[in-house]
Image (cartoon, rainbow, N blue to C red):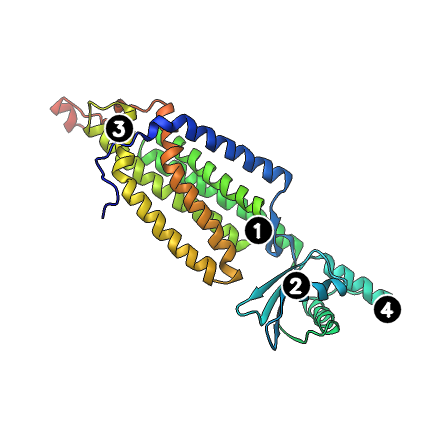
Amino acid sequence: MEIFNPNANIPFMRWRKLSMTVSCVLMALAVVLLISRGLNFALDFTGGTLVEARFAQPVPTADVRAALEKGGFSEFTVQSIGSGEEVAMRLPPEAADMIAQKQAEEGGEPVEVEANATAEHVKSALAAAGLQATIKRSEFVGPQVGKELAEDGVVAVVFVIITIMIYVALRFEWRFGVSAIAGEVHDTLLTVGFIAAVGMDFDLTVLAGVLTVVGYSINDKVVVFDRVREIFRSARKLSAEDSINKAINNTLSRTLITGVTTIMALSTLYFLGGPVLEGFAATVLFGVIVGTLSSIFFCNPILLWMGVSKQDLIKVTKDDPELALRP
C-alpha cells in the first residue's frame, strides 16, 4: 500500500539546516523546562498514600478537593475514575505527619500512621463536607521505595538507549549508530520536556510510555537506515545527499502509515482509557509524532553531516580465490 509515489524526489535534505535548527532550539527549550520546572513526580516516586473512594453518585472532583483542603490536606491530586462515581486521591508523605500531629493536638499519642488510618481521615474529611464515600483501596508507598523506582527508571532508559546504539552500530556502520543515538536522545528529551511543560504526573505508566517511545523511535530509524544502505550499494552514481533523499522517499508511505495507525490506537486509549492510561497514551502519542519527524529531518542530516559515503557500506571481498579458501 502506497500513499506517496516511492519514486518521488522530494528534496528533504535541502531543508536540513532549518530542521536541525528547529530541533536544536526545541531540545534547548526542553532542557530549560526540565531545569526550571522539573518533572511532577507522582506517588510512585515520591512516596505517599493512594486512596480510592466510591460515591453513591458522580461527584465533581472540585468538591472532593475542597473537602480535602478543609480537612487539612495539601499538595494532593484528585482524579475521577470511570463515570465519576469513583475518585482516586494521591496524598503526599506529609499527610501522615499532619494526621499524627492532629492526633497529638487532640490529646492522643502521635503514632506511625498507616495507609488505613490516612484513608479513615480522608473519609471523615469527605463526610464533613457532606460527601458520603466508601473506601475501596488504600496503599502506602514509602519515600525510599519511590527513590529506588526513580533511580531504576533512569537506569532503564539509559540502558535501552546504549543497547540500541550498539545494535545499530553493529548492524549498519558506526556513523549510523551515532546518528541513531542522537535521534534517541532527541526524541526522549523532547518527550520528557513535553511532560514537564504540561505538568503531567510522572508515574510508572508515564515512564513506561517514555520507554515505549525509545523503542518505537528506533524502529522508524532502522527502516530508513536499511533503505539508505541498500541505495548506497546499488545506485553508485547518486551522491550521498541524493541517496538519502531517495531512501526517505521510498519509505515515506510506510513511515506515515505506521505513524498514523499508531496515533489512531493511542488516541482511543487517551480518550476512552480513563485516567489510568491517559498519561501513558499522551506520552507515547507525542513521542510517536516526534520520532516520525526525527527519522526524516534529524537523523539523516546528522548522517550526511558525518560524511557517510558509499565506500563505508560496500562489502569488502577477497579477490584471490586461494586466499578466500583460507579460514
Instruction: Look at label 1 and name its amino acid.
Output: Met
Q: Is residue 210 above or below residue 94?
A: above
Q: Element under label 1?
A: loop
Q: Which residue is mark 2?
A: 62
Callout 1 touching callout 4 (CB < 8 Å): no
- Mark carried by residue 106: 4
Instruction: Look at label 3 and name its amino acid.
Output: Ser
Q: Nearer the viewer, mark 4 or mark 3?
A: 3
Q: Is residue 162 above or below residue 97?
A: above
The first of marks 4 and 3 along the sequence is: 4
Q: CA distance from mark 1 to mark 4?
A: 37 Å
The first of marks 2 and 1 along the sequence is: 2
Residue 186: % across, % down: 46, 36
- Mark carried by residue 200: 1
Callout 3 touching callout 1 (CB < 8 Å): no
Q: Which residue is mark 3?
A: 243
Q: CA distance from mark 3 to mark 1?
A: 41 Å
Between residues 143 and 25, which one lies in front from this camera angle? 25
Callout 4 touching callout 3 (CB < 8 Å): no
Q: Element under label 2?
A: helix
Q: Is residue 16 left or right of residue 313?
A: right
Disc 1 packing (10 Å; few <14; some 14–19; many ≥20): some
Q: Nearer the viewer, mark 2 or mark 1?
A: 2
Q: Element under label 3?
A: helix
Q: Is residue 143 above or below residue 235?
A: below
User: At x 19% / y 29%, what residue is drawn?
Assistant: 234
Q: CA distance from mark 2 to mark 4?
A: 29 Å
Viewer can see residue 327: no
Q: Element under label 4?
A: loop
